[in-house]
Image (cartoon, grey):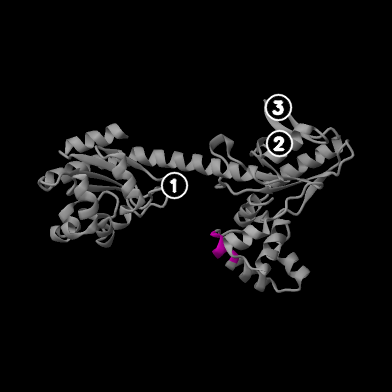
């Protein structure tokens, strides 16, 4: 990308260039590829001056932040207004920049990719970019968009999978992810530790090298195979919570394990392509239950005692109906409470709430 930005800058006779995400200066999808702009200038922009970027602000206000649009500095705001701005006086002038030709590679229309622009700059005494420069940049941007879209989507998928895997490893309850054929694709640390002990259940590769759960007891093995087949064959909407499972005795005499499964939707965040995860299993060690971090729920998300009580019950696998009957409350009251919890935690589904809370468990 640095070579690409350098070539684009030279093609339209710029002195510096920048391919970046103006509305995301940090995070996994943030992008900043400068040409002839020092790291110090880039850091000053990220730390403070992105908030004063009158060029970006003007583009948004004028509705120019649309994919494929090209604009020069005087298309964005009057020259006199720009020269009086703190953005020019404090930031651009010391950096030797006073002209811009910018094209929107991705605007705000596509939620799957971050808003991205390619900006070509000229110095303090340089002439404004002409129409030929704008048209040249306009012709080149579709090539950028194709390459960037591929990069963003791959990066997003990698970050999403890495983030969910890390979250699973923080949960003390054993988590097992299953493929469409019932094979084991991933285990978190807790499940892996239990399976490594081979105390009643372990992993085996009986068929074409695919790993599957294995229980020595034939009757229990048939029960587990039936549980997996049942979870994989049901509709995702019918598996919003886990209500059935198989008890697995341990030859060591320790408390038994309990395995339950739930079907996942096809657009779940745990895998891609041939390794798409189809179901999630919970391997619960009766002797080692996770405890929710009440202080974190209260201090980080501002949950009330009643909201924490609801979250605790949901994480134990209970349904809204079961919780309402247990507490003597109406389901409507609990659903209103759940909506407030969603707003405070930033999630919008019960499954995501449980996953978030369990990832913060002790």
Mark nearer the N terminus (3 vs 2):
2
Numbered label attached to residue 192 = 2
Q: State how far apart marks 3 and 1 are (Cα).
A: 42 Å
Residue 187, quarter of picture: top right
* Quarter where residue 121 is shown: top left
Q: Nearer the viewer, residue 122 or 106?
A: 122
User: In the drawing, does residue 94 fall left or right of residue 258?
Assistant: left
In the depicted structure, whether residue 81 falls above or below residue 281? below
Q: Is residue 196 above or below residue 89?
A: above
The secondary structure type at the circle numbered 1 is loop
Quadrant the N terminus occupies: top left
Q: Locate residue 212, reporting x and y percent.
A: 72, 33
| Measured Cα–Cα span from mark 1 to mark 2 | 30 Å
**Residue 198 locus on image (x, y percent):** 80, 32
Q: Which mark is residue 37?
A: none
Residue visible at 67% across and 51% down?
A: 361
The crowding category of the residue bearing disc 1, from other C-alpha atoms within 10 Å (few below 14, some 14 to 19, many at least 20), is few
Examine the rendering and report whether any part of residue 101 can be seen: no
Residue bearing mark 1: 27
Of 51 and 27, nearer the camera is 51
Tell me the residue at 17%/56% (across/down): 75
Q: Which residues are magenta?
A: 341-346
Q: CA distance from mark 3 to mark 2?
A: 20 Å
- Dot 3 or dot 1: first in sequence order is 1
State the image coordinates of residue 352 (x, y, percent, origin top left): 60, 54
Q: Which residue is at 17% across, 36% downward?
A: 11
Residue 225: give x, y in percent of width and height.
76, 39
> Which one is closest to the eye, mark 3 or mark 2?
2
Q: Within the magenta stretch, is there residue 82?
A: no
| Residue at numbered disc 3 | 207
């Amino acid at each position: 990308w640095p070579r690409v930005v350098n070539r684009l800058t030279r093609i339209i006779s710029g002195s510096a260039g920048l391919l970046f995400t103006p509305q995301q200066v940090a995070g996994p999808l943030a992008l900043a590829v400068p040409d002839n702009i020092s790291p110090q200038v880039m850091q000053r922009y990220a730390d403070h001056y992105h908030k004063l970027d009158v060029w970006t602000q003007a583009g948004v206000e004028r509705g120019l932040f649309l994919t494929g649009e090209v604009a020069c500095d005087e298309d964005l705001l009057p020259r006199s207004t720009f020269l009086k701005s703190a953005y020019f006086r404090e930031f651009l002038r010391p950096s030797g920049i006073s002209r811009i030709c910018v094209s929107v590679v991705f605007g705000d229309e596509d939620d799957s990719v971050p808003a991205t622009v390619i900006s070509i700059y000229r110095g303090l005494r340089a002439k404004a970019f002409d129409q030929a420069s704008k048209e040249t940049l306009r012709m080149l941007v579709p090539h950028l968009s194709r390459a960037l879209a591929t990069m963003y989507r791959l990066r997003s998928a990698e970050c999403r999978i890495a983030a969910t895997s890390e979250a699973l490893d923080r949960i003390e309850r054993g988590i097992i992810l299953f493929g469409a054929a019932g094979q084991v694709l991933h285990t978190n640390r807790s499940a892996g530790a239990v399976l490594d002990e081979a105390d009643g259940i372990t992993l085996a590769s009986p068929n074409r090298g695919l790993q599957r759960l294995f229980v020595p007891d034939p009757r229990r093995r048939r029960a587990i195979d039936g549980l997996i087949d049942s979870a994989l064959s049901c509709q995702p909407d019918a598996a919003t919570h886990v209500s059935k499972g198989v008890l697995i005795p341990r030859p060591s005499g320790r408390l038994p394990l309990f395995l339950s499964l739930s079907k996942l939707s096809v657009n779940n965040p745990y895998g891609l392509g041939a390794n798409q995860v189809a179901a999630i299993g919970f391997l619960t060690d009766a002797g080692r239950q996770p405890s929710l971090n009440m202080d974190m729920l209260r201090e980080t998300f501002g949950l009330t005692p009643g909201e924490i009580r609801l979250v605790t019950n949901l994480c134990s696998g209970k349904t809204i109906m079961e919780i309402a009957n247990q507490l003597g409350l109406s389901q409507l009251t609990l659903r209103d409470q759940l909506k407030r919890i969603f707003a405070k935690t930033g999630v919008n589904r019960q499954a995501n709430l449980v996953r978030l809370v369990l990832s913060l468990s002790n």
